[in-house]
Image: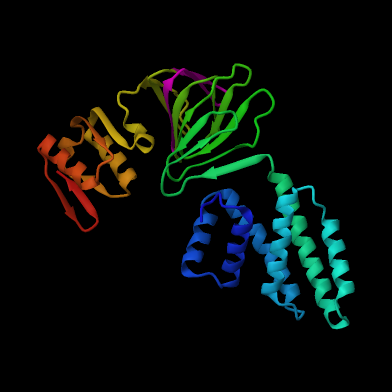
């Protein structure tokens, strides 16, 4: 189940997970969905609080919990179809009607169900209203490509998340980034495109650029157009083929030419080296293939390599590197040594 699965299906999976009735595969899916983004984690925390409160009430009655959930799920799905303007009062009205139809022995149980159901629906409506204008998407173990509301396209590296409005309004288009992503921005002179990352603001009108964020630094590389980077106190502008590395707590901002296209690997599926030092290629291979390659001979660390690897297996790439640079590559346990 993907992070952008329909919400009713996700809710049902989470309930199974909380009840301990999820299969091994479903439990894994639930865990992956929760971990996919901060938004999912907040959703689960809120969902868990409401569900546990509902369980406490339900345990005091003779209501069948599974049957109650099925009825509640039906109401949620009905609300999804009708839109978020559904009012909690309608749910309570249905509950009162249910009380009249049921026998005396079930009235107490039905009353509890009405409270639980109304509370859950109220929370879902309130939550959807709060977050209705914000969308958060995340990539997990692979890159992900998405179109933004204005027609701009973003390609995210694995482990990346972005947040943006469901509809850009006002005089700018703002996106929040955590991780690494490539932006191909649709030109609009009336609404500059702005990316916020690590307390920085990257502003453009129409261009394409790559941003890589980490705990220690932010790297911006411009492919086309012009990009302005600011932290509110200082500004640097980057043109096509230029990059800057802004380290935290470092007030000196410098720009340099981007000499190779190796940074594009996660969206092009190729490793494009142009006089690239070996250490840099190894660093990217470790990230792309989730492996541990170590250069054990410092003398070859900066050896340049010029070649292109097109979506090839790691073993094949290592073999070509060894033959091209006339170096030895060995494997011991989970570590690959280059020497």
User: Is residue 50 at least partly visible in the picture?
Assistant: no
Asked if residue 307 is among those painted magenta in the image, a careful observer would answer no
Total label count? 0
Q: Which picture quadrant has residue 284?
A: top left
Of 92 and 320, nearer the camera is 92
Q: Is residue 131 above or below residue 306?
A: below
Counting from the top left corner in percent of width and height, residue 128 is at 71, 48
Display coloring: rainbow
Counting from the top left corner in percent of width and height, residue 269 is at 33, 37
Of 139 and 244, nearer the camera is 139
Judged from this view, the residue extending furthest toward the bottom is: 105
- The residue segment tinted magenta is 216-238
Counting from the top left corner in percent of width and height, residue 299 is at 15, 36
Q: Which picture quadrant has residue 238?
A: top left
Quadrant of image for the C terminus: top left
Of 155 and 274, nearer the camera is 155
Q: Is residue 175 left or right of residue 90?
A: left
User: Is residue 190 at least partly visible in the picture?
Assistant: yes
Q: Which picture quadrant has residue 243?
A: top left
- Prevailing SS of the magenta stretch: strand
């Amino acid at each position: 189940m993907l992070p952008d699965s329909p919400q009713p299906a996700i809710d049902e999976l989470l309930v199974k997970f909380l009840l301990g009735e999820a299969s091994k595969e479903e439990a894994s899916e639930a865990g992956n969905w929760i971990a996919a983004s901060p938004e999912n984690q907040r959703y689960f925390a809120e969902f868990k609080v409401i569900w546990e409160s509902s369980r406490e009430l339900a345990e005091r009655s003779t209501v069948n919990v599974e049957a109650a959930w099925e009825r509640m799920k039906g109401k949620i799905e009905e609300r999804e179809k009708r839109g978020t303007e559904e009012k909690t009062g309608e749910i309570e009205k249905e509950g009162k009607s249910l009380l009249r139809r049921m026998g005396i022995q079930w009235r107490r149980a039905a009353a509890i169900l009405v409270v639980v159901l109304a509370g859950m629906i109220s929370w879902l409506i309130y939550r959807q209203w709060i977050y209705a204008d914000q969308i958060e998407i995340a990539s997990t173990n692979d890159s992900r490509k998405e179109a933004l509301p204005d027609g701009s396209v973003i390609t995210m590296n694995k482990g990346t998340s972005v947040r943006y409005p469901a509809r850009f309004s006002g005089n700018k288009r703002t996106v929040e980034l955590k991780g690494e992503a490539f932006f191909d921005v649709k030109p609009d002179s009336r609404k500059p495109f702005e990316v916020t990352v690590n307390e920085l603001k990257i502003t453009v009108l129409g261009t394409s650029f790559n941003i890589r964020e980490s705990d220690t630094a932010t790297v911006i590389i411009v492919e086309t157009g012009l990009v302005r980077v600011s932290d509110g106190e200082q500004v640097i502008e980057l043109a096509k083929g230029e990059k800057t590395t802004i380290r935290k707590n470092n007030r000196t901002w410098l720009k340099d030419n981007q000499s190779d296209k190796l940074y594009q690997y996660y969206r092009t599926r190729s490793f494009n080296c142009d006089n690239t030092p070996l250490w840099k290629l190894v660093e990217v291979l470790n990230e792309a293939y989730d492996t541990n390659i170590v250069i054990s001979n410092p003398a070859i660390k900066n050896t340049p390599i010029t070649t292109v690897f097109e979506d090839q297996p790691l073993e094949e790439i290592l073999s070509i590197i060894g033959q091209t640079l006339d170096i030895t590559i060995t494997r011991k346990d989970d570590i690959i040594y280059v020497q």
